[in-house]
Image (cartoon, helix red, strand yellow):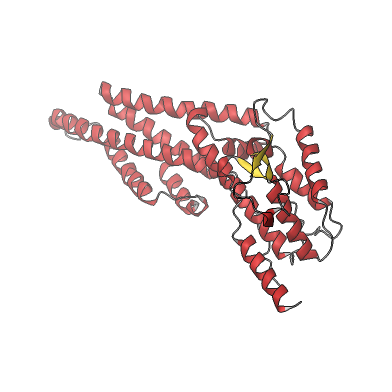
Amino acid sequence: MTNEADRELENYAAFIADFDFELSNGWLNITSFLFHLFQCLAADRQRQPPFVDDMYDKLLELIKRSKDRIPADTPVLSSAPVYGWTSEMAAMYPDGKAKMLHLGTLFFCAEEWIHAIGEMIPDRATDRGAAYISWPQEEWYLTNTFLQRFHAQYWSVLRDVDIKASNSTNFSSFEALSLAKRQEIEFDRAAELLKARNADFTAALERVDQAIEAGFPLEAITICESLICACLHNFLKASGSSKAPEGFARLIEDFRRAGDQSQYYPDKLMEKIDAWRRERNNAMHRFVARDPSEMSKGQKLFLKDARKTASDGRAYCADLLAWFQHESAFFLKVEFDLPKSRLN
């Protein structure tokens, strides 16, 4: 390989290593995707890749096959003019237009499509696992880099959409997918279970407010403890714990040990919750003054402290529920442990 060819390959490798699929607008540029995948395969394999038209036809076939699963109002394919088009871009965009696929449709066929492209390649890898992007040979640096960047950006955008949508749908689709997989149930069933659970969380928090306002701090404290335990328990189950502990202190301890599996571990909040746990114990134990002659004074002091403990617990519950709502979108693990290839 000449020095000039080496430089061209290195420049293209740097371009692919920093490739932006620009998915945040909700569409995938299919023309660009297939053009660069073709180029990566050609450079890695030093032989003819599958034709772009054949890879595109496979996508159309899968979209047609998935039409019963795709919501009726979901956009599918579109065509967009390439702004700033020049004659140098004619190889990719001969007519100055790009084929675009909406992510709402791509969601139902992306993995199957990329896997199907791999099956068009006779010298694909068959020993790198079952992941849909595991078929390139380990030494195919460009193809591996391109597909792994697509995977990371694609799922990141979908997760962001899910987090925003969960505010109105009252559940995370990513958590529903994770639950469906873990319990081997249908997605719709998992979604209904999560909606019911989250509705219970909201109702419990409202009940805490009612109990505090009505002057029943012990009831508020008890509900707060139940809410906190439910959040920690659900996180541990989603993280692979076979059986979360029942005791409050032990549950906090196990949660701390599993914290590295979270997207963002709420260390300061957990310190406050653990301190609150001890305040909760004091409030319960001081309900009746030890000395009968101090009963009236003890009750007044108890109510004052218990109200503060209840109010603190309510604030910690709200913070933990907000953390849990965001964290639940990360229960579905989409990372693949594939070997890192190098440019030869």
What residue lies at 72% left-to-right and 73% top-to-bottom? 5
Q: Is residue 27 left or right of residue 266?
A: right
Q: Is residue 333 visible?
A: no
Residue furthest top in the image: 214
Q: Nearer the viewer, residue 229 or 182?
A: 182
What residue lies at 32% left-to-right and 22% top-to-bottom? 210
What residue lies at 47% left-to-right and 26% top-to-bottom? 200
Q: Is residue 27 left or right of residue 267?
A: right
Q: Nearer the viewer, residue 339 or 182?
A: 339
Q: Residue 122 appears in which quarter of the rendering?
A: bottom right
Image quadrant holding the N terminus, namely bottom right
What x and y, as percent, mark residue 276? 31, 42
Q: How many marks?
A: 0
| Looking at the image, residue 14 lies above or below residue 75 | below
What x and y, as percent, mark residue 68? 74, 27
What x and y, as percent, mark residue 69? 71, 30
Q: Residue 285 appears in which quarter of the rendering?
A: top left
What x and y, as percent, mark residue 343? 69, 70
Q: Is residue 292 left or right of residue 269?
A: left
Residue furthest front in the image: 87
Q: Nearer the viewer, residue 32 or 128?
A: 32
What residue lies at 70% left-to-right and 65% top-to-bottom? 141
Q: Nearer the viewer, residue 169 or 281?
A: 169
Image quadrant holding the C terminus, namely bottom right
Q: Is residue 78 visible?
A: yes
Residue furthest bottom in the image: 3
